[in-house]
Amino acid sequence: MNYGYFDETNKEYVITRPDTPAPWANYLGSPEYGAIISNNAGGYSFVKSGANGRITRYIFNSEDKPGRYIYLRDNDNGDYWSASWQPVGKDLAVYKNECHHGTAYTNIKAEYKDIETEALYYVPLNKTYEVWRLKVTNSSDKVRNISTFGFIEFTNENNYENDQVNLQYTLFITRTYFKENKILQTINENTGKNADGTNFRERFFGCVGAPVVSYNGDKDSFLGRYRSYGNPKAVEEGKCDNVLNYNSNGCGALHSVLELQPGETKEIVYVLGQYNDEQSSEILDSYSDLSIVEKELAQLKGYWHGKLGNLQINTPSKEFNSMINTWNAYQCFITFIWSRAASFIYCGLRNGYGYRDTVQDIQGIIHLDPDMAAEKIRFMLSAQVDNGGGLPLVKFNHNAGKEDTPDDMSYVQATGHPAYRADDALWLFPTILKYIAETGNKAFLDEVVLYANGGEGSVYDHLQRAIRFSMERMGDHNMPAGLHADWNDCLRLGKKGESTFVALQLYYAMTILRGFAEVKGDAEYIGYLNKVQEELGNTIQTICWEGDRYIRGIKEDGQVIGSKKDPEANMWLNPQSWAVISGLATKEQAETALESVHRELNTPYGVRVMAPSYVDHAFDGALAILFNPSTKENGGIFSQPQGWIILAEALMGHGNRAFEYFMESSPAAQNDNADTRILEPYVHGQFTEATESPFEGRSHVHWLTGTASTVMVGCVEGILGMRPDADGLLVAPSIPSDWKEMTINKKFRGKDLQILVKNPDGAQSGCKEFYINGEKLDRNYIPANKLKDNNEVVLIM
Ligand code: NOJ
């Protein structure tokens, strides 16, 4: 069963049935002015912070209400409906609805009793307010008299928790006013100031295109007693009672009347934001020529499609194409920009960037916008402490050079993060490697960046300190200590416990840094790295390899975690994939470990993070047991590691297996299985329930997940085989053997590459012949100095 389809041409996901298994969301704007909207117009808006800058209400964990509602009423018979299916929820036999989620805009089309509507929602590029453009068309052959009601429910306080629970205060601090074409809301008006000393807040909801004939600034007056969003009294009666709020809940409700000749279309533009009377009038005036909306929409599309255009592919798999060309790429930008700030699951309370999250998020966009990536890499380097570790949480108002660290009580109190994590700074290595490889910008290594707590150093110095951080914190077996946790938040091995995953990350980091040391001609450091890496490699191979798998780690008290002897959690995914990615596993070990993964962890919906789930045999520190079996870290199909296993299989040249894992876990591949997956078929979630769950295949925690970047990397670097290094581009696809041909259009260092891959013999990887601009090369590598502005590349597998 599906609820929609991918429109590749317009880069939209089109929802053809509004009764989706869950609210299927889209992101508008940026955290400067952020708006999350569902296919039924549910959602919320905020300025700068989902928690502290909330301007509109949303009831989390509930029925996707309220939202940005536009009601319509046929004044000749009193029948009413909404431009989105909800909240009125007309019978779908007579009410038709299509939601087009696009890149930073959502357009909801409806048709009911010969009235067609389009409600387009977006935040104009670089603006901090939102626009709703309503188009109403009379497709009948008689004159129609239609009332429209634009409605938004304001919060009474910018802090959303206070707004919800501190009612003895928040109910008595706001007022609304009506002025010509807008409702203006004020908070703490008498003071002229907010509690934090800033000018008191004013929000507005206004419209242009049709006069306002009645209004409400008081929510209860608009909805009526014992009614709800689905049947507001004002809409039912065809008129608001012009009551404003005073010691009650505020709203903006604006009623207009449109007389429509047969075939005629009329438009109204609503604007919502946190601006005062004067500013909001200016903003509204700027829409008096309604055609500006089309220009702003074209600008938005141009911006996003331009970025996505830097890698466009055409393969035999429409699921792969949709994800790589549009949706996975767009999700990478959303996670990059929004981090884990706000969704329908993240309620806006995370007040900063998780170090590892953001450093990994960057990887997903490097091939699409390396400059944007570089800026964030610098930022994250400036959140590295001078001892080499990463700040577990980087505050949104991070003040490089002046921050406290987990060694200071003040940091612990402010962030709730009590200690360093073993892996945080190690994520810098692959991220910086990918950036330098994509751009060829080796000079990046010499850029000087502040440390979080003071002092500065070159990027090269930052990386050396990251290695030192791990080397100075070794456990009893000379592997990096687990510290507070590694990538797996639920794995507490003890401060001196040791994690195989981190050991493999460190091993890989040393390889990467050796490459940089070569660039710098730093022979002494190369000598050091050679020595410590060999020792570390030998240790991992001796202590962690069990013949068909790598163990997950060793607890502080010596207990081995993830041994095949264990009754539960005896097989873990990440040490196997990372043994390959890190380059440590021999070919034989890699083949064996990957086979073990397939045998013991694979499911129809992807690969489990470990199995069997903890039920009776968890060690203390195995926080995963808090979750139901087959859920999240407790044996669930955690989505982020799917990217790593795809990459590992692709690096081994196993195109069939890499693609099998892509398809199992890909949202797009579940489009026709939407009632099982529940989550949006166009975005990755944090995890999918595995075999022991009665709801196997159901996915959770939409949008803001590191999965976007790991799967992107697994697909682009792995399956498509776009593997740049500082001097050129290796083209080494690992594809399903039944793919006969594919094309990859890639922007690389300002040049255009049109790559045609032919696979006449049904290979999964490898290269027989390789050409650039008609010239045959002896291997599948394009030296950067051979690139022209436009390049035709042919690879015959
Ligand atoms: C979610 C966190 O955001 C991510 O950093 C972590 O690695 C995963 N949980 C796995 O525990």
Image (spheres, rainbow, N blue to C red):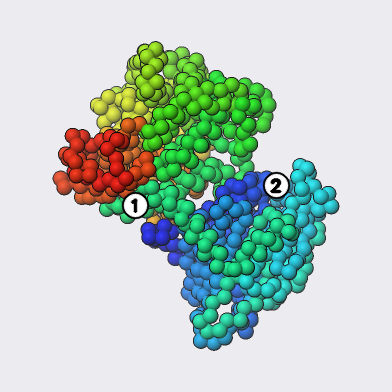
Residue drawn at x 32%, y 29% as measured from the top left = 580
Looking at mark 2, is its residue's CB closer than 8 Å to ligand 1?
A: no
Task: Specify the label residue 321 is tagged with.
Answer: 1
State how far apart marks 1 and 2 are (Cα). 41 Å
Residue drawn at x 21%, y 34% as measured from the top left = 779
**Residue 745 seen in the current view:** yes
| Residue nearer the viewer, 573 or 384 | 384
Identified by mark 2, the residue type is: Asn
Q: Secondary structure at mark 2?
A: loop
Mark 1 or mark 2, earlier in chain: 2
| Residue nearer the viewer, 623 or 148 | 148
**How many residues crowd around disc 2 within 10 Å: few (fewer than 14), some, or many (20 or more)?**
some
**How many residues crowd around disc 1 within 10 Å: few (fewer than 14), some, or many (20 or more)?**
some
Task: Specify the label residue 159 is tagged with.
Answer: 2
Q: Secondary structure at mark 1?
A: helix
Looking at mark 1, is its residue's CB closer than 8 Å to ligand 1?
A: no
Which residue sits furthest right? 190
Residue drawn at x 81%, y 60% as measured from the top left = 246
Image spot of residue 260 (x, y percent): 57, 81
With 505 as the anchor, is 154 left or right in this view?
right
Tell me where residue 540 sits by quadrant.
top left
Name the quarter where the N terminus is drawn.
bottom left
Residue drawn at x 53%, y 80% as measured from the top left = 264
Which residue sits furthest left? 761
Q: Are marks 1 and 2 in contact (CB under 8 Å)?
A: no
With 459 as the anchor, is 222 left or right in this view?
right
Residue 582 in the image: above or below residue 317:
above
| Residue nearer the viewer, 585 or 511 | 511
Image spot of residue 566 (x, y percent): 40, 27
Name the quarter where the C terminus is drawn.
top left
| Residue nearer the viewer, 791 or 549 | 791
